[in-house]
Image (tube, grey):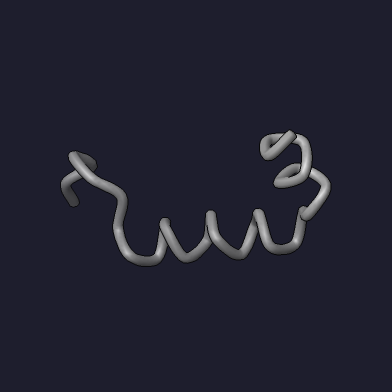
Amino acid sequence: MRETHLSFLEIASLQLYFIKQPHLSVTHNT
């Protein structure tokens, strides 16, 4: 497994993580 770039599953996991944690997105957007 090459870790030179994020895999599709890793990106999807990050997307779902931020979707489930809206307060983090609001903090970053502020």
Q: Is residue 10 left or right of residue 24?
A: left
Seen from this angle, which residue lies furthest right?
A: 23
Image x and y of residue 8, in percent: 33, 65
Image x and y of residue 24, in percent: 75, 42
Q: Is residue 11 above or below residue 26?
A: below
Identify which residue is drawn at 75% across, 62% down.
20
Image quadrant where residue 5 sits: top left
Between 2 and 30, which is closer to the camera in this rendering? 30
Seen from this angle, which residue lies furthest front?
A: 30
Q: Is residue 2 left or right of residue 30?
A: left
Between 27 and 8, which is closer to the camera in this rendering? 27
Image quadrant where residue 17 sits: bottom right
Image quadrant where residue 30 sits: top right
Q: Is residue 6 above or below residue 8?
A: above
Image x and y of residue 21, in percent: 77, 54
Identify which residue is drawn at 69% across, 62% down.
19
Report how many numbered discs are placed on residues in the image: 0
Image x and y of residue 23, in percent: 83, 47
Identify which residue is drawn at 61% across, 64% down.
16
Q: Is residue 9 above or below residue 17?
A: below
